[in-house]
Image: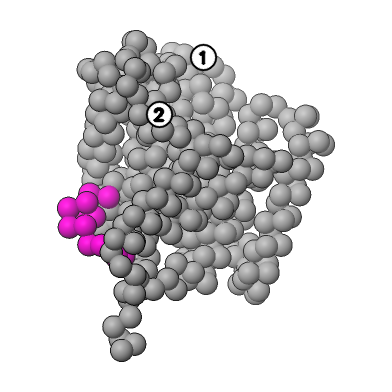
């Protein structure tokens, strides 16, 4: 009978499914912000349920950084550098191919500091939503140390790490942040506040908490209704209480939301939805950076007409998601192809 037991399966496909939901939540959050459009749109029937709660996508992505790191073969700076390069390639490709040609005069006249801040994600004047760059670089630099610390006593040391970073956050609020520039403030704040989620993600993967959830003894109606209600509840609660006393409460909401998604897709095959969500997750980082084209003030006048062919904001949001998905899919395919050619050429030369 033990061979018949089925548990939540959190493999590469499930990772992409979770990322797929996270990027859809992010697009929901950003597309319904009325100040990001050059033309007036109809918000009369906008789907605004717990709108701010879709910020949970940030916690989900941060959690998945730590979760994915737990499966690294060698948890060292070399591994981190390889993954930093993987992230920087789409980021810089979108910047140089799609953004810079539109505002190159303004960019090159902004000064070397602003140009450097843009590349590192420290300033959003030329590239919205690029803060993930420095958070990811930070994570890849510190996780070799943190992972070894957690490996010794997983639960205890994760708790210690979370408490320490919360205390650092509180202390910084009084003694460090007031003396920082705006760019440095946001960098330190985001890194420190998201570190507990990154550590928690590592712990969950290390201890395989999700994979301990048994699904074969749960009825399909219970899983379907329970997972969807849990996901909706986490989004709703996040809209009411996201940050308090310097603590990011997505520390609690994001793992539960991810667990609800994993349970749902472990119980049901979803013949048509599953491959779509896997592919959306596969292209999620590209979609993340591409959305800057239609929302960054200095460039959106050029690209935004592509998505504002409708006036109803709900249709605009849906169409934006479709456009960004296919654009991200095609761009990743192109970059993967070019990288494959470069790798083959390198091997031939060697």
The residue depicted at 56 percent of the width and 53 percent of the height is 252
Asked whether 90 falls inside the magenta stretch, the response is no
Q: Which residue is mark 2?
A: 48
Q: Residues within 10 Å of mark 2 (few under 14, many from 20)?
A: few
User: Which colouring convention does the figure follow?
Assistant: one colour
Q: Is residue 163 left or right of residue 137?
A: right
Q: Which residue is mark 1?
A: 109
The residue depicted at 52 percent of the width and 37 percent of the height is 239
Res. 56 visible in picture: yes
The residue depicted at 42 percent of the width and 45 percent of the height is 232
Q: CA distance from mark 1 to mark 2?
A: 40 Å
Screen quadrant of the C terminus: bottom left
Q: How many marks?
A: 2
Asked whether 274 falls inside the magenta stretch, the response is yes
Magenta region: 266-277
Q: Nearer the viewer, residue 288 or 251?
A: 251
Q: Is residue 334 left or right of residue 19?
A: left
Where is residue 333? Give x, y as percent: 23, 45
The residue depicted at 37 percent of the width and 60 percent of the height is 262
Disc 1 element: loop
């Amino acid at each position: 009978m033990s061979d018949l037991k089925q548990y939540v399966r959190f493999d590469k496909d499930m990772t992409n499914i979770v990322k797929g939901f996270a990027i859809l939540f992010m697009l929901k959050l950003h597309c319904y912000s009325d100040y990001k459009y050059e033309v007036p749109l109809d918000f009369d029937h906008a789907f605004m349920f717990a709108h701010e709660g879709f910020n949970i996508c940030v916690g989900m992505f941060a959690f998945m950084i730590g979760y994915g790191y737990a499966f690294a073969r060698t948890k060292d700076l070399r591994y981190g550098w390889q993954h930093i390069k993987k992230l920087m390639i789409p980021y810089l490709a979108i910047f140089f191919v799609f953004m810079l040609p539109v505002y190159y005069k303004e960019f090159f006249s902004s000064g070397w500091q602003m140009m450097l801040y843009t590349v590192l994600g420290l300033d959003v004047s030329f590239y919205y939503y690029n803060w993930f760059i420095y958070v990811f670089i930070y994570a890849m630099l510190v996780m070799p140390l943190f992972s070894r610390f957690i490996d010794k006593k997983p639960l205890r040391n994760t708790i210690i790490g979370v408490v320490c970073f919360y205390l650092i956050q509180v202390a910084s609020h009084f003694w460090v942040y007031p003396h920082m520039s705006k760019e440095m403030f946001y960098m330190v704040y985001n890194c420190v506040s998201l570190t507990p989620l990154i550590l928690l993600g590592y712990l969950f993967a290390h201890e395989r908490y999700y994979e301990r959830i048994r699904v074969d003894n749960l009825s399909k109606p219970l899983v379907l209704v329970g997972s969807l209600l849990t996901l909706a509840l986490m989004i709703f609660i996040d809209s009411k209480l996201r940050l308090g006393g310097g603590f990011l409460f997505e520390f609690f909401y994001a793992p539960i939301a991810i667990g609800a998604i994993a349970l749902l897709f472990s119980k049901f095959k979803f013949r048509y939805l599953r491959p779509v969500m896997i592919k959306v997750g596969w292209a999620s980082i590209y979609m993340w950076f591409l959305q800057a084209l239609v929302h960054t003030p200095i460039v959106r006048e050029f690209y935004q007409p592509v998505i504002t062919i409708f006036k109803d904001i709900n249709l605009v949001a849906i169409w934006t998601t479709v456009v960004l998905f296919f654009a991200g899919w095609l761009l990743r395919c192109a970059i993967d192809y070019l990288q494959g050619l470069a790798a083959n050429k390198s091997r031939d030369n060697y």
